[in-house]
Amino acid sequence: MMTKIALLTDSHFGARKGSQIFHDYFEKFFRDTFFPALDDAGIDTVVHLGDCFDVRKGIDYWSLDWAKRVFFRPLQERGITLHLIVGNHDTAYKNTLRINSPELNLQEFSNVIIYSSPGTHTIKNTPIFMIPWVCEDNAAEFAEELAFSTAKVAMGHLELAGFYANANYQMQHGMDMSLLSHFDQVFSGHFHKRSSSGNVTYLGNTYQMYWNDVDETRGFHFYDLKTGDLEFVPNPNTMFHKIYYKKGKLINPNLYTNTYVKLIMEDKVNPKTLNALVEKLYKADIQDLKVIETVDLGIDDDIEIETEDTLTTLSNYVMAMEEDVNKEGIIEIFRSLYVESQEV
C-alpha cells in the first residue's frame, strides 16, 4: 500500500476579493507544481489542513467555479481522496463550526471527506487525530476526544502560543502546545509561516498572499505515514519582490510581470533616471509598484535609538491606563486586530 500522502493548507480560495491576478498565480502553482508532483509520486490521498476558502460569510460564484475547476475536479478526475479539515476562515461564525463553507460548497464531490468535529480517524490504516478549528462550541468535545485518542499523529488547524504567525509577529496567546505533547508528530495549518518546535510543525501555506510573505518560500509537503518522513516541495513562483536599486544596476523588468514590487532606492537618483526605470517596470505589466527612497538622517553612529513594534506600544499604553478596565481583554483585541492587519 502506498503510504506517502500530500499535505497542504491555507489555500484561501476566493482571497483578495476574488482577484483574478492572484488566482492566476495560484493556478500556476497547482497546474505546474502541485498536480505534476502528485502524478509523479503516484499520490492517491491528500490532506488539507484548513482555510480552504477565504471569506467567512461566503464566496463569489467566479471564485467557487475557479476552485472546482483548478483544484477539486483535478483531484476527482485522478481518483484522489481529499481529507479536508475545517479552518477558522471556513466557518460562518467565530464560535461554532456548524455552518461551514466546505460542507455547503463541496457536496458534489464524493472523494472529499470533511472534518468539522475533532476526533480520531483512520487514513491508510494509520490513526490520525483530526482537529478542526477549536472554538467555544467544540472546546469541550476537543478536550474529551483528545483525552481518549491513542493516535500518534495529529493534524489540525491550530492556534498555538509561541509560534510565528508571520515573519514579524510571534503569537503570545493561544493553546499551549504541551496539550499535544503525547503525539509523536503534530502538523498544523493556520499560521502561514513554516516553522517547527518540538513535535509540532506548522506547514505554511501554499503561496505568497501578502507583503509580509516577501522573501519566504511557500509550497506543500509529502508525508510518509509509515516512516514519519516529511518532505517539503517548494512553490517556485513568487508574487512579491523587493528591488534594491543602486546607480548603474541593471534590472530585467520581465522578471516581475504580474507581480507586486517595492523599488527601494539605495542611492539618490535623478528624476529622469527614476522615471525611465518606473516606466520600464510598468511596461512589463507589473501589478503594483511602490517606490521607497532611503533617507540618511545624519545620526551619529554612537547614538542608540530604541524602537518597539506597534503591538508593544499599544500594550504598554493600555497597561499604563489608570482606569479600572479589563486591560488583558483590550490587549487581546489589539493582538487579534494586529495579526489581521498584517494581511495587507
Image (tube, grey):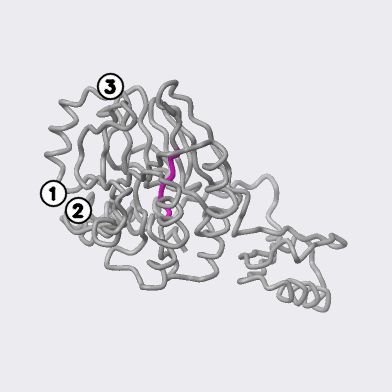
Do labels 2 and 1 touch, CB within 8 Å?
Answer: yes
Q: Which mark is residue 97?
A: 2
Under mark 1, the amino acid is: Asp
Q: Secondary structure at mark 3?
A: loop
Q: Residues within 10 Å of mark 2 (few under 14, many from 20)?
A: many
- Residue 91 in the image: x percent, y percent? 25, 57
> Is 7 covered by the magenta stretch?
yes
> Is 23 covered by the magenta stretch?
no
Dot 1 or dot 3: first in sequence order is 1
Dot 3 or dot 2: first in sequence order is 2
Under mark 2, the amino acid is: Leu
181 or 148, which is in the foreground?
148
Q: Which region is colored magenta? A: 6-11
Q: Name the residue that disc number 1 marks.
A: 137
Dot 2 or dot 1: first in sequence order is 2
- Residue 53 in the image: x percent, y percent? 36, 59
Q: Is residue 23 visible?
A: yes
Apparent side of residue 88 relative to residue 299 in the rendered image (left or right): left
Q: Secondary structure at mark 1?
A: loop
Do labels 1 and 3 touch, CB within 8 Å?
Answer: no
Q: Secondary structure at mark 2?
A: loop
How much space separates mark 3 and mark 2, taking CA atoms?
26 Å
Q: Residues within 10 Å of mark 3 (few under 14, many from 20)?
A: some
Mark 2 or 1: the one toward you: 2
57 or 74, which is in the foreground?
74
Q: Residue at x 35, y 53 (%)?
A: 51
Under mark 3, the amino acid is: His
